[in-house]
Image (cartoon, rainbow, N blue to C red):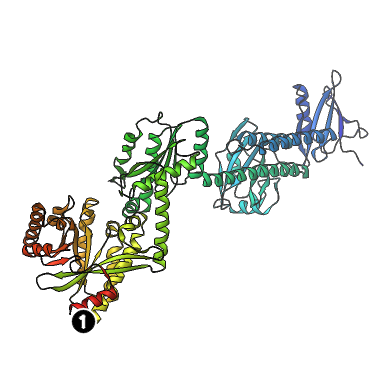
Amino acid sequence: MQRSITVLHINAVTHEFTNIMNNGKTSPFLNDEIKTIILQKIHNANFDNFKILMASQTFELRLGKYNANDYICLLTPLLQRSVEHTVELEIKLRDQQTKLFELAKLRNISRETMVDSLQSVCETVSELIDCERIGIWLFDEDHDVLTAQNIYDRRFATHSNKAYLDILEFPIYFQAVKSSRALAVNDVSKDLRVSELYPAYFESIGGIKSMLDAPIILSTGIGGVLCCESLTKRVWTELDQTLVGTLADMIAFLYERVSRIEAENQVRNLAYIDQLTGLPNQNAFISKANDELDANQDMTFAYLQLDQFSNIQDVLGFEYGEEVLKQTASRLTSIFLEPAHVARIGFDHFAVCFNKTWVPHYETQLLELKKPMQIDNQEVYITYSYGVSEYPKHGYNAKECLQRAQIALNDGRRYLSRGVTAAFIPDMIEVSKSDLQVEMNLRKGLDFNEFMLFYQPQTNCQTNQVVGFEALIRWNHPERGLVPPIEFISLAESTGLILPIGEWVIREAFKQLQEWKKQGRNQFTLSVNISPRHFLHERLAPFLETCLQEYEIHPDKLMIEITENLAMKDYVAVQGRIKELRDLGFSVSIDDFGTGFSAFVYLQHFQIQEIKIDRHFIREIVENPKSFAIVKTIVELAKHLKLRVITEGIETKEQLEMVRNIGCEIIQGYYYSKPLPIQEVEEWLAQRV
């Protein structure tokens, strides 16, 4: 094989160049300009290796002095580097590869921690192929923009990452990058693939003459380029392209590793972080709280829920409803500072784990949640309910204690719909189990049509004519028999089952009115009790309107009964709902009138048509003059206000005579009949005829 290394003898005095390895003949490419450069370096005693372009080929030159005026110069074409230099390159490449692999093995590697490594890669590439500017660029998701992750400029020993290239400006270049395994441009002024970059872009970064791009190939395709830019024209050798391609693959491996870790972290965040509030979710809360229990003997768990948040969200919309949740989360974390733990564990549910010594007055501090929130330029007020449990008194781990706190909250909600504060006691578990069993049976009862209506007559005691009935629900339980509503309505109210149960009652009432209409009994009205939760639900009025159209019943035949204490829940909402029902043509009756604090609020401000005097007054009307006076006053007041009065609970003839004498007309009670199933109602009516 012909040797390609040229060794020259140079006389610094005579400026003679002699090829001592080729019979005294000098290289034909060694022109006067190159000889002048060599002599100048000898004159300046600059013996650093340097490269020079001769006849479109790059040579490396090494100078050495062996006596006063005589020098040796070795010319090595870079395409055929010396074995020693190739070994040197391999060592550097392997060293850089080892560093990148070690970095890739780290669990905490990220795009931020990669900065130093990217800078090191760029410096290594610059040294390996002797190039002034090295850049690592990545595509965006659409492959429309290339953004510099790091650019090393050897001239100034600087690193930067401020540049980007857009496909709209450089479509030909982008196409070339995406389609080539390597983009080797020996002369940027003549290569059409970079014509959009020449001269403006190349001149702006110092006058680039040659460029070599190696694609960074990821599992999803080309992810970017490793770009090498030279200030001198050069022919990119196969070795140059191999070296740059190898390092580009190493960079790709590093980014693949980072992307995988980012994906794993995203999955972990989804598993442990609530995406809306940034709080830990239930999984994270249980884990962190258990760790806390190992270090602390006494801990308190609170299970907190916003009151009627669904209604708030219905009014504000999803976006502003979410803002309420975010502000609630922020307030909770400001109350329960670390080392306490706060989490969002459900739709409007939050959990807190803390030691009372950390937050000694948490009950008072929680009042911060009630302060108005600025949402969409309006003040929004919320209330909350919570249950608490204690570790280790009520549970052996965080999950048990949180469940106990939730049981306490649910038990408190059996009596109040908002503002509940309840501490766990062991008896609540049995109550909760019983409630769960009843709830499951209620759902089953709805599915298997186990409910039925009983009807109690309402009679005009002056004419002895039946004017209507009250529909009363019964649960025909397959094992327990007939279950009265007092045993399941409150639970149905708290669980939301009251809505489908209430709608079933309304539909059955319409069916019965339709049947009486077919029989020619148009004189009968039918009263149905609507629970507070159902009455305030937005679905009530549309459902009633649908039933009117479906069964073709006049609305004055169905009386809507509500309890007196309903006004205490939401005065404005109750007033609006009554008006809505009146606009549909329905009449509204106040059941158990006189037992609460809001009786006269209804009479003064609400559009009601009927009141039903509570049976508690009737029970003692014969023996207790005060009861008699109260009933008489209510009857007289109702007459002045032109309201119909129904007296409930009449069981004896003496009671009947007393209420008849004070002007009561409509009577309901066991004196006439107990509540009856519809078959017995027909028999009872036949007997009266």
Pick out the residue farthest to the bottom. 519
Quarter the C terminus occupies = bottom left
| Of residues 82 and 361, the one drawn nearer to the viewer in this rendering | 361
Left or right: residue 167 versus residue 448 is right
Residue displayed at 21% across by 74% down: 554
Amino acid type for the residue under numbered disc 1 = Gly
Answer yes or no: is residue 279 visible: no
Q: Position of residue 147 (x, y in %)?
A: 57, 44
Closest to the observer: 88 or 257? Answer: 257
**Relative to the observer, which residue lies in front, 474 or 166?**
474
Task: Write down the quadrant of residue 383 in the picture.
Answer: top left
| Residue 18, percent from left and from top | 88, 30
In this rendering, is residue 132 above or below 16?
below
Binning the other alpha carbons within 10 Å of mark 1 as few (below 14), some (14 to 19) or many (20 upward) gives few
Q: Which residue is mark 1?
A: 520
Q: Is residue 425 above or below residue 609?
A: above
Question: Which element type, helix, strand or loop, lies under badge 1?
Answer: loop
| Residue at left offset 38%, top offset 67% | 450
Q: Tell me which residue sits at (33%, 67%) in the image.
A: 504
Q: How many marks?
A: 1
Of 233 and 459, the residue lying toward us: 459
Q: Is residue 109 visible?
A: yes
Q: Residue furthest right?
A: 23
- Residue 388 location, x and y as percent? 39, 40
Residue 297 locus on image (x, y percent): 48, 30
**Above or below 211: residue 516:** below
Instruction: Please give left or right for residue 397 compared with residue 255 in the image.
Output: left
Q: Is residue 341 left or right of residue 187?
A: left
Quarter in which the N terminus is drawn: top right
The residue most toward the top is: 68
